[in-house]
């Protein structure tokens, strides 16, 4: 399930959704707000999400992961609104019989979520400026 | 033939155009035509290849046809995660 929320992401609570007696592995990814980007001191970050399409596109990504890898369950939650340094911006969790497919599916989901969902982030810098982050840059510099 | 379209702008596009939506009358066959004509009007700095488009809340391609009455959503480069 793909979910957009304005509330704090609580991975321990989300993980419980993936419980399954057949699961021998669980892999997760959390993206956190970092205090710098490309030499700029970042104070906070603002996510804009076009929720109707972010949800449908995220559901497609999860369905693709389920088709590609023999996993049991997969969920993704992404924040919207204003986030402070250290907060969790995105969480992906996957449970499966064995670890290989859990790692692979988790990686697939976060990589696709970053490049396909209509989500934008604006960084607010210590010098008072702000700017929209371009994902081409994220990809190049391994952001998040 | 001119088509009446609702165009919605997001994030940097909204700030650049100074509005979040507008109704336009364009002689446009595809989503690409819409982007290019509005780029001239608003002067967007983003290359089309880095942007995405949706039509009536469905992700679309730049070659997708646009019809009279459609809502076109123009997305600047995305940056989730």
Image (tube, coloured by chain):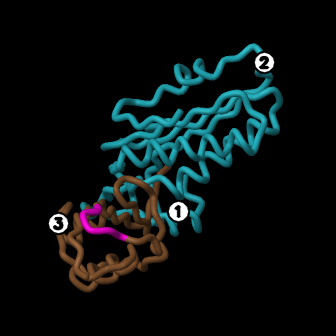
Chain colours: A cyan, B brown
Q: Is residue A130 visible?
A: no
Q: Which residues are magenta?
A: B66-70
Seen as rendered, the residue at the extreme top is A21
Disc 1, disc 2: CB below 8 Å?
no
* Most common secondary structure along the magenta stretch: loop
Tell me if mark 1 has few (under 14), some (14-19) or many (20+) residues whose alpha carbon lies within 10 angstroms of its own.
Answer: some
- Residue A73 appears in which quarter of the rendering? top right
Mark 3 secondary-structure assignment = strand
Q: Specify whether A14 is left or right of A9.
A: right
> x and y percent of residue B69 in the render?
24, 63
Mark 3 belongs to chain: B
Q: Is residue B53 visible?
A: yes
**Residue at (37% x, 61% y) in the render:** B55
Disc 3/disc 2 C-alpha distance (Å): 52 Å
Q: Please identify, in this view, whether the residue under mark 3 or under mark 2 is nearer the observer.
A: 3
Q: Which mark is residue A22?
A: 2
- Name the residue carrying label 3: B22
Tell me: residue A112, above or below residue A39.
Answer: above
> x and y percent of residue A112 in the render?
59, 53
Mark 1 belongs to chain: A
Instruction: Say whether mark 2 and mark 3 are on the same chain.
Output: no
Q: Which mark is residue A138?
A: 1
Q: Please identify, in this view, whether the residue under mark 1 or under mark 2 is nearer the observer.
A: 2
Tell me if mark 2 has few (under 14), some (14-19) or many (20+) residues whose alpha carbon lies within 10 angstroms of its own.
Answer: few
> x and y percent of residue A83 in the render?
35, 42
Tell me if mark 3 has few (under 14), some (14-19) or many (20+) residues whose alpha carbon lies within 10 angstroms of its own.
Answer: few
Q: Which mark is residue B49?
A: none
**Residue at (28% x, 61% y) in the render:** B71
> x and y percent of residue B2 in the render?
22, 80
Q: Specify whether A100 is left or right of A109.
A: right
């Amino acid at each position: 399930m793909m979910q957009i929320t304005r509330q704090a992401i609580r991975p321990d609570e989300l993980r419980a959704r993936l419980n399954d007696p057949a699961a021998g592995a669980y892999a997760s990814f959390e993206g956190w707000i970092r205090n710098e980007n490309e030499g700029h001191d970042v104070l906070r970050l603002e996510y804009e999400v076009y929720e109707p399409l972010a949800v449908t596109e995220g559901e497609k990504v999860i369905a693709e992961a389920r088709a590609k890898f023999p996993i049991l369950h997969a969920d993704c939650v992404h924040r919207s609104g204003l986030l402070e340094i250290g907060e969790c911006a995105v969480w992906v969790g996957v449970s499966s019989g064995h670890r290989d497919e859990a790692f692979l599916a988790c990686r697939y989901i976060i990589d696709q979520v970053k490049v396909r969902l209509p989500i934008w982030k604006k960084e607010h810098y210590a010098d008072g400026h702000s700017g929209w982050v371009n994902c081409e840059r994220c990809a190049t510099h391994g952001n998040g | 033939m001119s088509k009446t379209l609702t165009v919605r702008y997001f994030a940097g596009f909204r700030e650049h155009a100074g509005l979040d939506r507008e109704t336009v009358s364009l002689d446009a066959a595809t989503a690409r035509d819409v982007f290019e004509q509005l780029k001239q009007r608003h002067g967007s700095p983003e290359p089309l290849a880095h942007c995405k488009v949706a039509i009536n809340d469905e992700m679309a391609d730049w070659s997708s046809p646009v019809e009279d009455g459609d809502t076109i959503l123009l997305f600047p480069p995305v940056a989730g995660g």
